[in-house]
Amino acid sequence: MTKILLIVAFTIGIVLWFKYMAGKRDVLPRKEKSSEDMVRCESCQVNLPRSEALLSQGKFYCCDEHRRRGD
Ligand SMILES: [Zn+2]
């Protein structure tokens, strides 16, 4: 009987874990996709995903320092 309870608890744990992971994926949409748009930093010319780039006056930058330098 104890074994059955353990299996049930284990199953519930897995279901909750999957729900947690699914919720996490909604918070960070498409970040792991490799087909994401790549943009180039105006300052150092490095390529980076659009979601990680900083946009300023229609130009992309890899970091805040380069964005300030580019302005
Ligand atoms: Zn840069």
Image (spheres, rainbow, N blue to C red):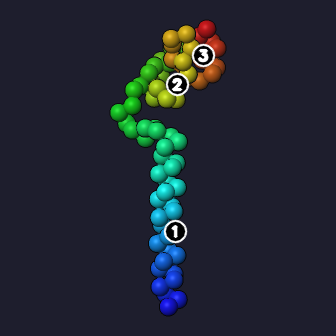
Q: In the drawing, what numbered circle is on residue 13? A: 1
Q: Taking 49 as reference, is 60 above or below it? A: above
Total tally of numbered discs in the picture: 3
Residue 64 visible (yes or no)? yes
Q: Residues within 10 Å of mark 2 (few under 14, many from 20)?
A: many
For image coordinates 51% across by 81% down, the residue present is: 6
- The earlier-in-sequence mark between 3 and 2 is 2
Marks 1 and 3 sit apart, C-alpha to C-alpha, by: 45 Å
Where in the figure is residue 63, as x and y percent of width and height? 59, 24
Q: Secondary structure at mark 2?
A: loop
For image coordinates 37% across by 36% down, the residue present is: 34
Q: Which residue type carries mark 3?
A: Arg
Q: Which residue type carries mark 1?
A: Gly
Q: In the drawing, what numbered circle is on residue 53? A: 2
Marks 1 and 2 sit apart, C-alpha to C-alpha, by: 37 Å
Where in the figure is residue 66, as x and y percent of width and height? 60, 17
Position of residue 27 in the picture relative to residue 35 (left or right): right
Q: Say whether mark 3 is within 8 Å of ligand 1.
A: no
Q: Which residue is denoted by mark 3 in the rendering?
A: 67
Mark in front: 1 vs 2: 1
